[in-house]
Image: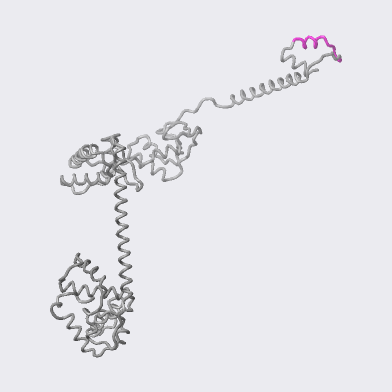
C-alpha cells in the first residue's frame, strides 16, 4: 500500500490520495485496480529515480572537470613542448567520419624530411618548428597531413617545357589541310600510322629529320581537338587506330566492302587454281622420273658418263627451259642454258629417286674433286648436300680406266665453249 501511495503522490492521482487520507492505520480499503496499470506506475517511479541519480552524477562530474581549455602555446614560444595538435592543419581532422589520431614524431628521418621540404618551400612556420628537436618538443601530426606535405610536387617534363617549333606548327597545319581536302571530301578510311607518316614527311620537307616522341604520343589529341566530332577514331581488331569521317556514307561503304570481298574471293580462287596446277605438275613430274628405266653400265666407260647423253624425261626439259629463259619453246638456247639444263635435270632426278638413279654429273663431280684434292671430307660434304654419290660408292664403281675418266671430265668441263660456264655444283 505504501508503494502505491508514493506512486500516486508522485503522479498526483487525487482520487487515490483522498482514499489514503481517510484510511486509518492497519485498515485495508477495498480498492480494485488493473495489474498492468500498477506495473506501469511502478516502472515510472523507478525511471524518475534513475533520472535524478544520473543528473546528480553529471553535476558532480562537471564540478570536478576544468571547463576552460588551457591556452594554446605558440609554436615559437619558449615552452619545452608544443601543444598536442597537428603542426600542419592545427585542428581536428576527420577521415571517413572518424576522428584521425595524432602521431607523435619519434623518428629522426621525420625531422630531416620536414626540414628539407620546409627549406625548399621557404615555409617559415615549419622551419621554426624544426629548429628544435621535434622528438624532445613532442611534435604531433596527422598521418594524412604529413603524407600530403611531404608528397613530391609534379615536375614538368623537359619535353613539355620546350618552346613551340615553327616547323612542327607548319607541319600540323599541312596535315590538317590534308585531312580536310583528301580525307573528309573523299570519305575514305585511313589509319593513324598514315597520319604519322604524313606528318613526318611534312617535317622533313621543312628540314626536321625526326618526329619527337611526345608529338607522336599526342597526335590523336591534337587531331581530336582540331576536328572534334567531325572525325571518329577507334581501334580495330589488331588494336590499330582507324580514322573515318563522321559523314561517311554507310551505303557506299557497304558497296565498297562487297566489291572488295568479291575481289578477295576472286584472287583466292585464282591462287587456289594455281596451287592445284602446281600440285598436279609436281606429281606428274615425280611419277615420270620414278618410271625411268635407266641402269648404270658395267664396266663404266667414258662414253657412258657423257652429260649430254643422259636420258632426261621430255616433260622435264620444257619446265626447266621456261624456268631459265621464261620461254619453254626456245629452239637455239645458249651453251650456258644447255649445260645448266642438263645439270639441273640430273640433280632433280638424283634427288627424286633418292640416289637410286646415279646420273653422270653425280659421279663425275665427286670423282674429279676426289682426284684433284684428295680430300675425303670434301667428298662426303658434297654427298650430304645432294651433289654426288657417297665416297664408298665412288670407290666401288667398276671403272675401265681412271685416266680416261679424267680425260672425259676435262673434255666436258674445261674446254671451249664451256670454259666460262658454271661447274656442276
Task: Judge whether residue 270 can be spotted in this image.
Answer: yes
- Residue reaching furthest right? 26
Residue positioned 69% across, 22% down in the render: 47
Majority secondary structure of the magenta segment?
Answer: helix
- Place residue 131 in its image quadrant: top left
Specify the quadrant that holds the C terminus: bottom left
Which residue appears at 31% of the width and 44% of the height? 258
Q: Nearer the viewer, residue 405 or 118?
A: 405
What residue lies at 25% left-to-right and 90% top-to-bottom? 400
- Tell me if 293 is positioned left or right of 407 in this view: right
Q: Is residue 253 left or right of residue 93?
A: left
Residue at screen point 60% across, 26% down? 61
Q: Is residue 217 left or right of residue 337?
A: right
Seen in the image, is 237 located left or right of residue 327?
A: right
Work out whether 270 lies above or below 39.
Answer: below
Please say whether residue 19 is one of the residues in the magenta stretch. Answer: yes
Quadrant in which the N terminus appears: top right
Quarter of the image for residue 292 reads bottom left
Quadrant assignment, res 367: bottom left
Q: Indicate yes or no whether the magenta region holds residue 216.
A: no
Numbered range of the magenta stretch: 14-26
Is residue 228 among what the camera can see?
no
**Picture coordinates of residue 148 (x, y %)?**
40, 38
Q: Residue furthest left?
A: 416
Number of marks in the image? Answer: 0
> Viewer-proximal residue, 38 or 4?
38
Q: Position of residue 134 (x, y in %)?
A: 43, 40
Residue 310 image offset from top left, x and y in percent: 24, 79
Residue 188, image x and y in percent? Answer: 26, 41
Amino acid at each position: 500500500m505504501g508503494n502505491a501511495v508514493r506512486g500516486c503522490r508522485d503522479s498526483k492521482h487525487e482520487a487515490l490520495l483522498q482514499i489514503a487520507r481517510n484510511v486509518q492505520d492497519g485498515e485495508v480499503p477495498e480498492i480494485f485496480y488493473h495489474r498492468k496499470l500498477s506495473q506501469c506506475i511502478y516502472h515510472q517511479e523507478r525511471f524518475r529515480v534513475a533520472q535524478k541519480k544520473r543528473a546528480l552524477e553529471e553535476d558532480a562530474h562537471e564540478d570536478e572537470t576544468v571547463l576552460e581549455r588551457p591556452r594554446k602555446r605558440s609554436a615559437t614560444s619558449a615552452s619545452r613542448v608544443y601543444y598536442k595538435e597537428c603542426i600542419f592543419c592545427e585542428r581536428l581532422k576527420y577521415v571517413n567520419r572518424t576522428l584521425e589520431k595524432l602521431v607523435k614524431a619519434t623518428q629522426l628521418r621525420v625531422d630531416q624530411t620536414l626540414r628539407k621540404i620546409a627549406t625548399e618551400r621557404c615555409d617559415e612556420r615549419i622551419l621554426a618548428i624544426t629548429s628544435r628537436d621535434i622528438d624532445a618538443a613532442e611534435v604531433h601530426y596527422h598521418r594524412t597531413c604529413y603524407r600530403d606535405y611531404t608528397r613530391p610536387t609534379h615536375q614538368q617534363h623537359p619535353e613539355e617545357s620546350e618552346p613551340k617549333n615553327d616547323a612542327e606548327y607548319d607541319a600540323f597545319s599541312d596535315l590538317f589541310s590534308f585531312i580536310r581536302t583528301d580525307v573528309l571530301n573523299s570519305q575514305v578510311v585511313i589509319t593513324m600510322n598514315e597520319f604519322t607518316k604524313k606528318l613526318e614527311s611534312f617535317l622533313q620537307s621543312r628540314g626536321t629529320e625526326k618526329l619527337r616522341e611526345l608529338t607522336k604520343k599526342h597526335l590523336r589529341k591534337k587531331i581530336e581537338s582540331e576536328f572534334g566530332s567531325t572525325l571518329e577514331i577507334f581501334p580495330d581488331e589488331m588494336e590499330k587506330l582507324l580514322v573515318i569521317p563522321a559523314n561517311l556514307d554507310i551505303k557506299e561503304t557497304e558497296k565498297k566492302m562487297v566489291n572488295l570481298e568479291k575481289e578477295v574471293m576472286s584472287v583466292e580462287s585464282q591462287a587456289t587454281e594455281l596451287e592445284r596446277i602446281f600440285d598436279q605438275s609436281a606429281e606428274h613430274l615425280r611419277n615420270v622420273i620414278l618410271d625411268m628405266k635407266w641402269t648404270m653400265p658395267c664396266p663404266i666407260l667414258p662414253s657412258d658418263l657423257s652429260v649430254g647423253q643422259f636420258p632426261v624425261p621430255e616433260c622435264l626439259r620444257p619446265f626447266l627451259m621456261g624456268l631459265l629463259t621464261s620461254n619453254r619453246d626456245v629452239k637455239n638456247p645458249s651453251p650456258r642454258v644447255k649445260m645448266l639444263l642438263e645439270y639441273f635435270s640430273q640433280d632433280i632426278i638424283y634427288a627424286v629417286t633418292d640416289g637410286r638413279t646415279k646420273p653422270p654429273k653425280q659421279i663425275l663431280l665427286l670423282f674429279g674433286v676426289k682426284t684433284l684434292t684428295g680430300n675425303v671430307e670434301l667428298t662426303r660434304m658434297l654427298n650430304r648436300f645432294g651433289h654426288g654419290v657417297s665416297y664408298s660408292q665412288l670407290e666401288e664403281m667398276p671403272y675401265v680406266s681412271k685416266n680416261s675418266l679424267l680425260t672425259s671430265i676435262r673434255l666436258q668441263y674445261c674446254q671451249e665453249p664451256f670454259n666460262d660456264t658454271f661447274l656442276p655444283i
